[in-house]
Image (spheres, rainbow, N blue to C red):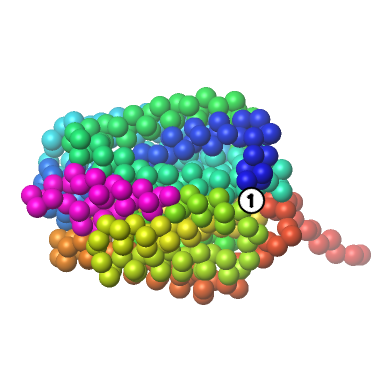
Amino acid sequence: MGLYRDLGKNPGVFRVLGSQLMARFPFGMLSIIMLLHIQVAYGDYTSAGIVLATQSVGQAVSGPLSSRLMGKWGMRPVLTVTSIACTALLVMIAMLHLPLVVVTVLALLVGLATPPITPAVRTMYPKLVPGKQLSALFSLDAAAQEIIWVVGPVVAVFVTSQFNTTAGLCVAAGFMLLGGAWFISSPALGKVKLLPSKRGLGAVLRYPTVVISTVIGFFFVASFAAIEAGIVAAFAGPDGGHGSMESGLVLAVFAGGSLVGGLLIGHREMRPWSPALRILLVLAGTAATLFSLNIWWLSIVLFIGGLGTAPTFAAISTIVSATVRFSETAEAYGWIGTGQLVGVATGSALAGIAIDVAGAHGALIVSSGLLVACAIVAIVALRWMPDLRGRSIEPPAETGTVTIPLP
């Protein structure tokens, strides 16, 4: 644990880590709350799937675009405008009972206005700590991220069970506004200037590692969104209610496994096969949920699966930081963030349809299938994965080699 303690010697690191966690926390809540809110309002999960899919389209557009805008206009202006706009749109969806078509349009705007917190903070990390500490910081960030993606739904289930889905959406909006303000006001944010990319939008996708990380992130996070919906459906009351605290307990244990795995495994030196092995561990725990919906069985197997979750996210961040130039890392993380956010919406949408067709088991099957696809991608991509044993994790130099012909 000394690795993580040493991070505190770098000024502002823990404030940035905590503030970005709070600012990103709503995205762990939104998929499940939006799914339940639309289902309650319109009577079926398919309508909720349509809304979430539309939101994902907006996120797919906004991720890399807003990341490039931060390099052009600065991080603070872009983060401020998007945080306020996204918060206002969420409150509108929560408070106003509108036709489904209108809500779908608002969901698209929510996606477009998604604050680019992830690309901003992960681009900052290499400038906040020495290269030898970067792996530990990415590991700690990944463990914290699991609070977002796994504990977020627990909070969502608790709020909706105690109050309603309207309150849940408003709580998510509050986290977004307050967390965004805390992060934007961080002194460290003003000290790190993003360099404008010298190439056109999408050129960063020429890096195989960026494409691989984006695809892996999509399938990986989509599987979590699906299993979260399946766990909630598994413990729903006979009246179709969504207030069972058993689901919150199971998801909390899942989060606990991820936190433990992130702290114990995530900082280890990455080899080409590391992401695939970590994904297979998560797959083993997820597939085991198909044997029983007993709360104790689910808790045990998901804790085991959770051990590989945060380490996989740490591997994705490490791969990008070690292979992409600093001027292009913001856009790279933007594409990866888009893949993950679209994965949340896609996983929830597929799970919603599967629940309508086959109940909770349908969502668990969807989650397992998405992880199988994720593992296949990681195995096929072994040849492009960097071997970082004994290497300092720092972005490659901005300058390249120029060949000058001799006279």
- Residue lying at the far right in this picture: please name it: 407
Is residue 233 magenta-colored? yes
Please name the residue that numbered disc 1 is placed on.
135
Residue sitting at 34 percent across and 29 percent down? 174
Residue 100 among magenta residues: no
Kindly tell me whether residue 117 is visible in this rendering: yes
The quarter of the rendered structure image containing the C terminus is bottom right
Residue 338: x %, y % from top left = 43, 51
The tally of labels here is 1
Front residue of 375/290: it is: 290
Up-down relation of residue 330 to residue 383 (above or below): above
Q: Quadrant of residue 125?
A: top right
Q: Say which of 158 and 343 sits in front.
A: 158
Q: Which residue does the image show at 49% across and 44% down from the upper left?
A: 144
Which residue lies at the image location 36% right of the left edge and 48% below the top edge?
252
> For this view, does 300 lie left or right of residue 236?
right
User: What residue occupies the far front of the structure in this picture?
Assistant: 296
Q: Is residue 4 above or below residue 349?
A: above
Picture coordinates of residue 214, whole percent (x, y): 48, 58
Residue in view at x 42 percent, y 39 percent: 24
Q: Secondary structure at mark 1?
A: helix
Main secondary-structure element of the magenta-colored stretch: helix
Residue 49 screen position, x and y as percent = 22, 54
Spot occupied by residue 171 in the image (x, y as percentages of width and height) = 30, 32
Amino acid on which disc 1 is placed? Ser
Residue stretch rendered in magenta on the structure: 228-256
Name the quadrant containing residue 188. top right
191 relative to 344, above or below: above
Asked if residue 218 can be seen in this view, the reply is no
The crowding category of the residue bearing disc 1, from other C-alpha atoms within 10 Å (few below 14, some 14 to 19, many at least 20), is many
In the displayed structure, does residue 179 sit left or right of residue 391? left
